[in-house]
Image (tube, rainbow, N blue to C red):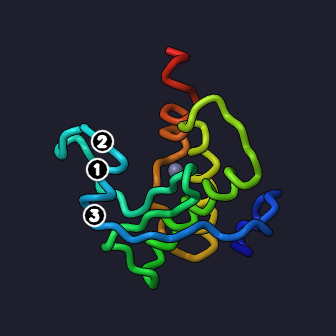
Amino acid sequence: MAWLGTNTSYDISAPPPRIEYKTMRELSDMMYGDIPMKNRTEILAVYSVKTDTIHLGDGFAVSDKQHQAILLHELTHHLQNKNNVKVRCSLLYEPEAYRLMKKWSEDSGIPYQGPGELTIQIRFSSCPEDD
Ligand SMILES: [Zn+2]
């Protein structure tokens, strides 16, 4: 959280999000709904705006730096929520979360495993209704 306070202009004084563990399958269902398994990618964490909760899959390992990078991504969504960042659709919350994840990974000396800048610009810079 302190790192996010230093690296963003967000007010980090709001209470931290709730943390709730789920099985990997529950988490996947939560994220993908009716989408068939073969079209899903594995996810470790999901932030829910409604309940201000980060749901972590039971495969999440606190000491794993790559997992910490994912947690940082979700904490970014928490701060966006608490700082009342408004965007036209939820996809537009992603570029900042991925860029901060990238910066944190670099600062921590681990390879960044999220989408590259080009992918971010293509996938997360317009809303479905723009098409
Ligand atoms: Zn995200």
Q: Secondary structure at mark 1?
A: helix
**Residue at mark 1:** 29
**Residue at mark 3:** 24
Residue 87 in percent (x, y) is at 67, 34
Q: Secondary structure at mark 3?
A: helix
Residue under the image location 51 percent in, 56 percent down: 47
User: Nearer the N terminus, badge 3 or badge 2?
Assistant: 3
Residue under the image location 60 percent in, 53 percent down: 97
> Which three-letter amino acid code belongs to the residue tagged 2?
Gly
> Which three-letter amino acid code belongs to the residue tagged 1?
Asp
**Residue at mark 2:** 33
Q: Are marks 3 and 1 in contact (CB under 8 Å)?
A: no
User: Nearer the N terminus, badge 3 or badge 1?
Assistant: 3
Q: Are marks 2 and 1 in contact (CB under 8 Å)?
A: yes
Give the numbered dot on residue 78.
none
State the image quarter where residue 62 is shown. Answer: bottom left
Residue under the image location 34 percent in, 67 percent down: 22
> Which three-letter amino acid code belongs to the residue tagged 3?
Met
